[in-house]
Amino acid sequence: MALKKLVAGNWKMHGTGADLAEVNAISLAAETAPCDVALCLPATLIERAVRAAPGFAIGGQDCHSADKGAHTGEISAAMLKDAGALLTIVGHSERRESHGESDAVVRAKAETAMAEGLSVILCVGESLETREAGRAVEVVSAQIDASLPPAATGKTLAVAYEPIWAIGTGKVPSADDIAEMHAALRNRLVDAYGDAGREIRILYGGSVKATNAAEIFAIANVDGALVGGASLKAADFLPIIAAGAA
Ligand code: PGA
């Protein structure tokens, strides 16, 4: 049976108070959406967004693996929770690449976030070089095996498959390549968590737009999307949400 889809926006380093009107418009659409909707915002906007759109799922984009401590500039899972976040992304490729985050670090972040009561969107994905070498499934399978927290359910975890070469580029893998990767990820999740692994949503991310969302959502084991650029404006994001009927 198909899982209810999750369409999550990732605003990355975009958004100030002036953009709260977009959050509002998206949260209103979420009330009648055919899928679950969330927005992962810059930390500075979370509390204001939660106030502006009570009950709407607002998340962070990362958290530290430690509960607290001398980590200048970092944000803890407890801080996200305190600001009103319900979820957080961990292991986005932009952090794995530019902050040197290993699978072990990503796993520790996921565990800390869950212990704090946040649900987690855990990202994996291959480089273009790996894809062209024909090793995408092997490399991403190893990544997920080493990044998964020891326990998870469909309520506490979603996985996002985001090929690095598809992020912000307008390029999207073929439907067959997405299906192959999502089937491999489903197997890894069932291996790790038994039947609970069938309830964990596997999102696709990387250049999802209004024009390709329905086609991507129709692929087996695609249980939603993690959307960057096209989540910043309600006008771009709402048609993607509308395409998210299971
Ligand atoms: P994009 O980003 O939709 O702008 O390609 C996706 C992501 O990085 O989560």
Image (cartoon, rainbow, N blue to C red):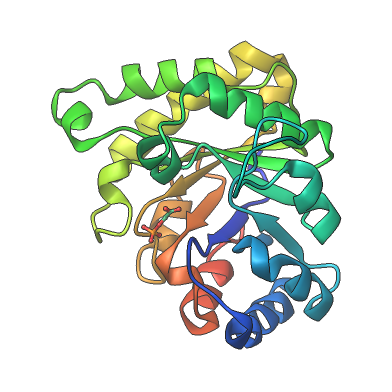
Q: Quadrant of the C terminus?
A: bottom right
Relative to 238, is 193 on the left or the right? right
Task: Please indicate, yes or no, whether residue 31 appears anywhere in the rendered image.
Answer: no
- At horizontal 62% and vertical 46% (from top left) the residue drawn is 74
> Residue 68 versus residue 107: which sits nearer the camera?
68
> Residue 214 versus residue 205: which sits nearer the camera?
205
Q: Quadrant of the N terminus?
A: top right
Q: Position of residue 208 (x, y in %)?
A: 39, 60
Number of disc labels: 0
Relative to 102, is 193 on the left or the right? right
- At horizontal 76% and vertical 75% (from top left) the residue drawn is 48
Q: Which quadrant of the structure image shows residue 67? A: top right
> Residue 241 versus residue 24: which sits nearer the camera?
24
Task: Please indicate, yes or no, whether residue 121 appears anywhere in the rendered image.
Answer: yes
Q: Position of residue 160 (x, y in %)?
A: 51, 41
Quadrant holding ligand 1? bottom left
- At horizontal 71% and vertical 27% (from top left) the residue drawn is 111
In the image, residue 137 above or below residue 4: above
Q: Position of residue 189 (x, y in %)?
A: 59, 21
Q: Position of residue 225 (x, y in %)?
A: 51, 53
Relative to 230, is 201 on the left or the right? right
